[in-house]
């Protein structure tokens, strides 16, 4: 959206006022939220193990591993912030901020300024990382309250969300719930905002979105189209997965039970077995033996819908062996000498 020079200047003035009101002293807090999340996952995993929910425990352990990694990165970044903190951060003049805002159009094609909500936003070009299409992202910068630790806050919104199957909240390997995992870029991003270098800020975040770090993704690109097996909780790629014909839960091929009659795949909860041959079978294909009521696959029922056991028993009961009939006359004749 084209912005009038008056609107751009008013926003530049608001940015200068925001930076001046907050001053140069900022408080750097510990990553308490990440720490509490790790404690929560540890308790949940322990409860799952105690109750014998081993698949759930395995899933929670994977989540805990990711959260601990994120916590450690935040602590390292905090250390860097403390070591590189400057004593004075001069506030740029309104004219300098104005020039930065005008440069956004040249860098991103267009940008949007909302004076009422005190927000500035740009939209990136559609992003493709290692062959995975992620779409375009809006980077939205907003003013914070005067009692906040930082002058601004920002979020990243997917314009055409291409979330992985395993987590709808993830729209980018490093974006979850519209919040960017900044990693090593946290310090320069924080500095650019505190110093009012808005063009640098938007360029830094855009470059971050165009970059993939395989060591710390919320969901790895290699698993982007993967799904979690509902039976064993393993994450499997598209080529290695199937689904339950009944409930449509995704399954790995090792956990899929193929019906001996229809050959469709079923999960553990939706499949059963023939009571005679013990082969896997779905409920729809099982039929009852007409005599004993046993659930049987089609291979274990004869044309009269009898299972092999009942068929044998019924045949034995109706079988009459051929016997030579004897009469008193034949006995008498046989005993009379010639």
Image (cartoon, rainbow, N blue to C red):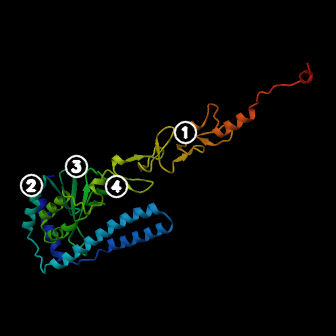
Quickly name the residue at label 4: 168
Residue 181 lies, with reference to residue 325, above or below; the image says below
Decide: marks 3, 4 in contact (CB < 8 A)? no
Quarter of the image where the C terminus is located: top right
The circle on residue 131 is 3
- Along the line of sight, which residue is nearer the eye, 157 or 206? 206
| Left or right: 175 as drawn, with respect to 189 | right
Check disc 2: other Cα within 10 Å, few if <14, some if 14-19, many if 20+.
few
First in sequence: mark 1 vs mark 4: 4
First in sequence: mark 2 vs mark 1: 2
Quickly name the residue at label 1: 285
Q: Secondary structure at mark 3?
A: loop
First in sequence: mark 3 vs mark 4: 3
The image quadrant that residue 178 belongs to is: bottom left
The residue positioned farthest toward the front in the image shown = 338
Residue 81 lies, with reference to residue 175, above or below; the image says below
Quickly name the residue at label 2: 106
């Amino acid at each position: 959206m084209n912005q009038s020079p008056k609107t751009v200047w008013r926003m530049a003035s608001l940015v200068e006022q925001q930076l001046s009101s907050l001053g140069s002293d900022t408080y750097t807090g510990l990553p308490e939220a990440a720490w509490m999340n790790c404690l929560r996952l540890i308790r949940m995993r322990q409860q799952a193990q105690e109750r014998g929910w081993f698949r759930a425990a395995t899933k929670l352990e994977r989540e805990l591993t990711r959260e601990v990694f994120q916590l450690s990165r935040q602590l390292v970044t905090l250390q860097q912030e403390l070591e590189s903190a400057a004593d004075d951060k001069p506030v740029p003049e309104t004219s300098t901020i104005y020039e930065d805002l005008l440069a956004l159009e040249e860098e991103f094609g267009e940008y949007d300024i909302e004076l009422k909500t005190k927000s500035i936003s740009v939209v990136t070009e559609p992003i493709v990382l290692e062959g995975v299409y992620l779409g375009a992202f809006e980077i939205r910068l907003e003013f914070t309250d005067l009692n906040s630790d930082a002058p601004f806050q920002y979020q990243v919104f997917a314009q055409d969300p291409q979330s992985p199957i395993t987590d709808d909240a993830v729209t980018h390997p490093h974006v979850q719930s519209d919040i960017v995992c900044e990693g090593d870029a946290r310090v320069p991003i924080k500095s650019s905002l505190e110093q009012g270098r808005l063009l640098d800020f938007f360029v830094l975040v855009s470059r971050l979105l165009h970059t993939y770090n395989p060591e710390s993704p919320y969901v790895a690109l290699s698993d982007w189209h993967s799904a979690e097996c509902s039976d064993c909780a393993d994450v499997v790629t598209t080529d290695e997965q199937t689904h339950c014909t009944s409930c449509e839960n995704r399954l790995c091929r090792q956990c899929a039970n193929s019906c001996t009659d229809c050959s469709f795949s079923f999960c553990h909860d939706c499949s059963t077995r023939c009571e005679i041959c013990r082969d896997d079978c779905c409920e729809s294909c099982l039929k009852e033996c007409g005599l004993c009521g046993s659930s049987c696959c089609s291979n274990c029922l004869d044309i009269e819908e009898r299972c092999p056991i009942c068929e044998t028993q019924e045949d034995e009961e109706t079988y009459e062996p051929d016997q030579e009939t004897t009469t008193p006359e034949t006995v008498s004749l046989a005993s009379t000498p010639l």
